[in-house]
Amino acid sequence: MEAHRPYSPEAIPEQARIRAETSKHLSNLPPFHPTALRLLSISIDGDTALPEFEECFKTDPALASDLLVLANSAQFGLRHRIDTIRHGLMVLGLDRVRSLAFSIAMRSYIGASPRHRDLQPVWSHSMATALIADQLAASAGSAAKLLYTAGLTHDIGRLGMMLGSGRKYAELLSQPVRDVAEGMALEEERFGLSHCQAGLVLARKWGLPSGLQDCIGLHHDPPNAAGGELLYLTQIACRMADSLGFSEVLQTAEPQADSGGFRLPEPFRGRPALAPDRLLSLIARQISAVSKLEPGTAN
C-alpha cells in the first residue's frame, strides 16, 4: 500500500481546486426526498404533530404504502395488521415512524443511483449504526429524539462522494487502509474533503436539523458525553457497527482495545440487549426488511 504523504506548499492551490470541484459535485446532486425532510421539521412534542404527520403521508402515497409494508413485516412481529398511517403512528410512535420513513427514503435515493451496488457497504454500515444507536438508547433509558435517523444519516458524506465522483470514490473505498483516520486523510488528498466535511455540505443543502449535522461532521471524534447524547451515542454506535463487521473501510490493522474505538464505555458493558449475537440478528432483519422494498419507488 502506498504511504500517505503530507501536502507540499505547491499542492495547496491544486487542493483548493479539487475541494471546490468536489463541493460543486455535491451541490449538484439530486434533492433528497421532500416528505422525509418535512417529517424531520415537525416537532413530535407539539399538539399538531399527529395531523401534520398524516398530512405528509397523504401527499405522498408511495411513501405511505412502503411504510405500511415495512411496519407489517416480520421485523416488528406485530400481533395485528396495521392498515392505515394513523394506526401506524399510534402503534409505532411518531419518532419510530419518522425513522422508518427516512430509512425508506434513503434506500430509495441509493437504489435509484447507477452506483447502488458500490454503495451497499455504506448502506449496511449506516443501517447497523442506526439500529445499534437505538439499542444503546433503550439500554440507557434515553429518550433522545432522532437517534435512529442520526445513525442512518451520519455517513451521507460517503453517499454524496460516491454519487458525485463515481468510480473514483468507489476505488478509494476498496483500498485497504490502516484505520479510518488514514482513509479520511486519503479522502482529503484526492477530493479536498473528508466524508465528514462532504456530509456537512449535503446536510446544509438538505436542511437537516443541527443535531444531525453535528453527528455527520463529528462522528469520528472520540466519543464524549459532553457533546450531547445524540452525538455521543451515534459515535459509539458507529464504532460498534465497525466491530460487528459492518465496517466503513477495509482496515489492515485491528482496532486497539484501549482506544475507545470499539469497546463499549463502562455503563453499557454487560447489557444483554447489546450482546453481539442479538445486535447482529436485529441488524440482519432490518436490512432485509428495508431491502425487500422496491428501490426508487418512494420518490
Image: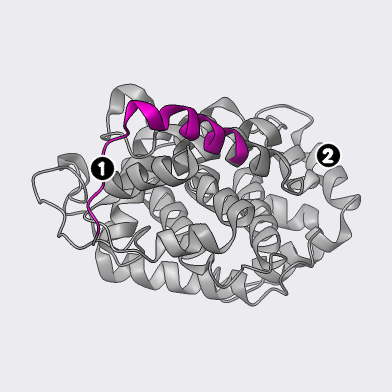
> Label for residue 51?
2
Check disc 1 and report the residue beneath it.
5
Q: Secondary structure at mark 2?
A: helix
* x 14%, y 60%: residue: 254
Callout 2 environment at 10 Å: few (<14), some (14 to 19), or many (20+)?
Answer: few
Pointer 2 with pointer 1, Cβ within 8 A: no
Question: At which x and y percent is residue 78?
Answer: 59, 70
Amino acid tagged 1: Arg
Considering only order in the chain, which callout, 1 or 2, is on the residue closer to the N terminus?
A: 1
* x 76%, y 45%: residue: 31
Question: At which x and y percent is residue 252?
Answer: 20, 63
Would residue 260 appear left or right of 14 to someone viewing this image? left
Q: Quadrant of residue 63?
A: bottom right
How many numbered dots are placed on residues in this image?
Answer: 2
Name the one closer to the observer, 157 or 7.
Answer: 7
> Label for residue 230?
none
Above or below, 197 against 54 in this view is above
Quarter of the picture holding the C terminus = bottom right
Question: At which x and y percent is residue 234?
Answer: 39, 42
Q: Tell me if I can see residue 7 in this picture.
A: yes
Above or below, 35 against 119 in this view is above
